[in-house]
Image (spheres, rainbow, N blue to C red):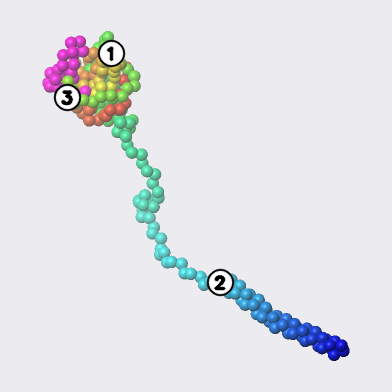
Amino acid sequence: MANSKILFGKLIVLSLSAASLSVAWQQPVAAEIIANSNNSAIASQSVKPESKLPDLGAPELPPLGEPFRFIPQEPKAPVNPVEEVRLVLRLRERRVYVYRQNKVQTSFPVAVGKDGWETPTGNFKVLQMIKDPVWEHPWTGELVPAGPDNPLGTRWIGFWTDGKNVIGFHGTPNPESIGRAASHGCVRMFDKDVRALFEKVAVGTPVIVEH
């Protein structure tokens, strides 16, 4: 029994010694791992060398008088020829005025409706435009083809209707009536003048008729 106890004691001492050696051997390894991890951390946090910026050169200076090349410009709204032009017919003056952007561009003498057949006043728009129109007699229904004897001349610009009758600007084979109140409501013009007016308006152009 005594020998067994002594052997057992030695075994315990040897076991403890082996354990201490194991611990002592593991500590440097752990320290090395920690050191390596710290080195990795330091390496990962090391500052990267600064990259060189591209050489953009000297900025281009805008030449005098050309700011549109460098300053953004607001897009201009497209010009609507129907809204840009308007006609103003002044019955007392026996004259129609062509306005473009609120400025008088030209005017033409006219004949207007006589007593009992007055040309209506108000704000209207061009409803119809016809070259070389055919005229229909309002009472007999007779049709008069285009030509020198046509009461409408070579151009028709209608701007008023009650659903049955129509009123507009037109030429006339009776130029002596221009400047008078002589029509049945329509606005007579010299044929050369109504041709010129025809080129300045479109369907939808405002027509303002004043006393």
Q: What element carries label 2?
A: loop
Determine if the magenta segment contains residue 154. yes
Tell me how far mark 2 sits from mark 3, CA to CA: 89 Å
Q: Which residue sits at x=32%, y=32%?
A: 84
Residue drawn 34% across the image and 21% down it: 123
Q: In which quarter of the image is residue 176?
A: top left
Q: Is residue 117 visible?
A: yes
Using the image, determine if residue 77 lies above or below residue 108: below
In the rendered image, which quarter is residue 106 located in?
A: top left
What residue is at 25 percent from the left and 12 percent from the top? 114
Q: Give the left or right position of residue 69, taking residue 137 as reference.
A: right
Image spot of residue 33 (x, y percent): 64, 77
Q: Quadrant of the N terminus?
A: bottom right
- Tell whether 14 sits left or right of 207: right
Q: Which amino acid does label 2 sit on?
A: Val
Say which residue label 2 marks. 47
The secondary structure that dominates the magenta segment is: loop
**Residue 97 — which label?**
none
Residue in front for this viewpoint, 47 or 106:
47
Quadrant for residue 197, please give it. top left
* Other-residue count near label 3 (Cα within 10 Å), few / some / many at <14 / 14–19 / ≥20: some
Q: Name the residue under label 3.
A: 132
The residue where tag 1 is placed is: 118
Looking at this rendering, what residue extends furthest in the front direction? 1
Q: What residue type is labelled 1?
A: Glu
181 and 85: which is toward the camera? 85
Mark 1 secondary-structure assignment? loop
Q: Which of marks 1 and 3 is nearer the N terminus?
A: 1
Image quarter (top left, top right, bottom left or bottom right) of the C terminus: top left
Residue 127 position in % (x across, y down)? 28, 24
